[in-house]
Image (cartoon, grey):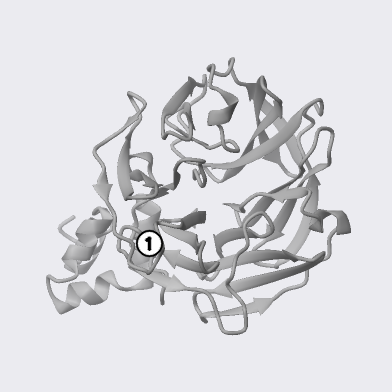
Amino acid sequence: MADLPTHTIVFEILTRLPAKDVGRSKSVCKQWYALLSTQDFVRIHCSRSVVSSNQRVLLIDDLTCSVRPIISNNNDYGPSSIVTFPFHHQNNDVSILSHLNGLLCVCLNHTYELLLWNPTTTAFKRLSTPDSHGFYINNLDAIGLYVDADDDYKVLHIKRRSGVLGVYVYSREVDSWRNIPFITRQEYLSPHFNWSAGTFCDGTLYFTVCECWIGGTNVVICFDVNSEQFKEISFPPVPSNGMVQGVLVNVKNVLHMFARTGMFEMTIDLWTLQGDYWIKVLSCPPIPPISLSLWCDITHYVTNGNWFVMTKLGKLFTIEMDMKPFECFYPVSWFRGFKGAVFVQTIVSPII
């Protein structure tokens, strides 16, 4: 250690600080401010921040927006901290669509505008433009947030408008939108198909596309973020005698899916993607007796070997899984009573 340059030692120490402490450290001196603002520092600090102990749950209701730590050993939250939105809104009408490395892509429901927001640093960026880019319509559009090989954070926006599909990419680096081609089956443009938010895993964004009735078509659309090419792969071979829904989870950079089938009684299996094929990992134990009216989609996340399920009241249920700790999360995005997300605290900025 004595042979290491002081700069290297300081860099190594600071990249291990909590995000809020990094923000405070910028005021120490000009040299630290410059160091802590470099993209190399932000990238390495982010890679060391994506751990379960650094996860937070953000919940939005009609009156407040709060952030709480997750206490995984007793299936509960820690004390809440009230968050003030740094942007104009009406009655907390903010929907969280996607997240990555501490950034949230959100929609202001009264204006349909898209924003990138870091709730830890409070920095945000409006993505809407005068030429109608960056406006989101619920139940028709799909959003995916990702980072490419050049460390540029981007938003993929899939729009369905009157049977016409438009696909657009926003780049944080150049602060603009552009159109990219995507040819798919015409039926997927119908509002009868539900597109999930994109899940980023190992250089690819994945979307589930599920038909909204029993026995309907279910597929997975893949977007390679570097080649910007789309392809379609099959859904796991689950029974089709009920409603089918797949929730994608990035587990240590391997894509998994919780596939739910059924109506009032649900069967949920965990699958993992190997190449273009799904391998069944496990069948979950019987689901706790939660009234169907409490559910919204499947809002859950996994961490430390447990699978947590959240209801509209913000109540957490847990199902123990006989597996090694996942140390990862799935972002809860929508409830009937609450809206929110699970995110990690980082210093990644929505603005270059």
Identify the residue shown where x is 64% and y is 65%: 157
166 horizontally vs 3: left or right: right
Image location of residue 45, percent across then percent down? 33, 58
The secondary structure type at the circle numbered 1 is loop
182 horizontally vs 99: left or right: right
Question: Is the N terminus in the top left, top right, bottom left or bottom right quadrant?
Answer: bottom left
Relative depth, front residue between 232 and 114: 114
Image location of residue 299, percent across then percent down? 53, 37
Question: Is the C terminus in the top left, top right, bottom left or bottom right quadrant?
Answer: bottom left
| Residue 219, placed above or below residue 119 | above
Relative depth, front residue between 211 and 151: 211
Image quadrant of residue 154?
bottom right
Image location of residue 330, percent across then percent down? 51, 42
Image quadrant of residue 260?
top right
Residue 210 seen anywhere in this rendered image of the structure: yes
Q: Residue furthest left?
A: 28
| Residue 92, placed above or below residue 276 | below
Relative depth, front residue between 76 and 274: 76
The residue carrying mark 1 is: 118
Identify the residue shown where x is 53% and y is 17%: 288
Q: Residues within 10 Å of mark 1 (few under 14, many from 20)?
A: many
Residue 4 seen anywhere in this rendered image of the structure: no
Image location of residue 254, percent across then percent down? 59, 42
Amino acid type of the residue that numbered disc 1 sits on in the rendered structure: Asn
Identify the residue shown where x is 21% and y is 68%: 7
210 horizontally vs 49: left or right: right
| Residue 160, placed above or below residue 56 | below
